[in-house]
Amino acid sequence: MKKIIYIILAGLFLVAISYVNLRAEESIVSSNIKHIYEDITISEPYTKEECYFKEVPVYTDLPSTQAQGAEVVTGMLLGGLLGKVVTGNDKGAVGGAMLGGVLSAAPRPSQRILHGHMKEEVCHTVFKSKWVTKNEYSHSLITFKTSDGYTYELQFQR
């Protein structure tokens, strides 16, 4: 790749010399090739892992349970008393006792109890950018002087 660039530069130099020789009958006294670099500032993206601690609740699940015999009997007694008070007769007491027994015998659903809290680390990727200054190639100059004192300059990019 460098050889191709040097060949192109030499070709440009010869073209420049021919141009000067055709334009004037003087000869070239000196020549110089200079590469120009400029500072440019660009935004360069990058990623960063950011982490923090978060409090998370910890639960304990209690399984569903069946009612014990004493609980069913207590439900029947309370239902019977409530049925007697509300209706004022024994048939209401019997209906209340049956309803109290059925309700207290129903299986209890599982319960979720808050046991406490624990700290958990949470991480995620953040996309950011930073400004970076780089010195990059801009262009090149070929300068040559002729015997009659004129200076010629050609600008090109390699």
Image (tube, rainbow, N blue to C red):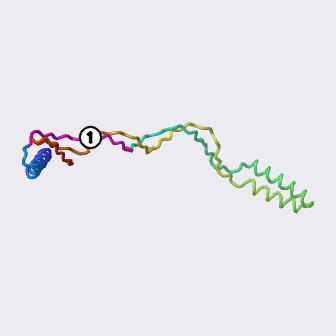
Residue extending farthest to the right is 88
Camera-side residue of 125 and 152: 152
Disc 1 marks which residue? Answer: 37
Element marked by disc 1? strand
Residue extending farthest to the front is 148
**Would you say 49 lies left or right of 98 here?**
left
Give the percent coordinates (x, y) of residue 85.
Answer: 90, 56
**Exactly how many numbered labels are in the figure?**
1
Give the percent coordinates (x, y) of residue 98.
Answer: 80, 59
Camera-side residue of 37 and 147: 147
Magenta stretch holds residue 35: yes
Classed neighbour count for the residue bearing mark 1: other residues with Cα under 10 Å, few (<14), some (14–19), many (≥20): few
Does residue 97 lie above or below 138 as drawn?
below
Quadrant assignment, res 128: top left
Q: Which residues are magenta?
A: 28-44
Residue drawn 45% across the image and 44% down it: 126
Give the percent coordinates (x, y) of residue 158.
Answer: 19, 47
Magenta stretch holds residue 32: yes
Give the percent coordinates (x, y) of residue 103.
Answer: 75, 56
Residue drawn 32% across the image and 40% down it: 39
Residue drawn 66% across the image and 49% down it: 65
**Would you say 25 lies left or right of 57 here?**
left
Camera-side residue of 103 and 152: 152
Residue type highlighted by circle 1: Tyr
| Secondary structure character of the magenta stretch overall | strand
Residue drawn 6% across the image and 48% down it: 25
Does residue 106 lie above or below 34 as drawn?
below
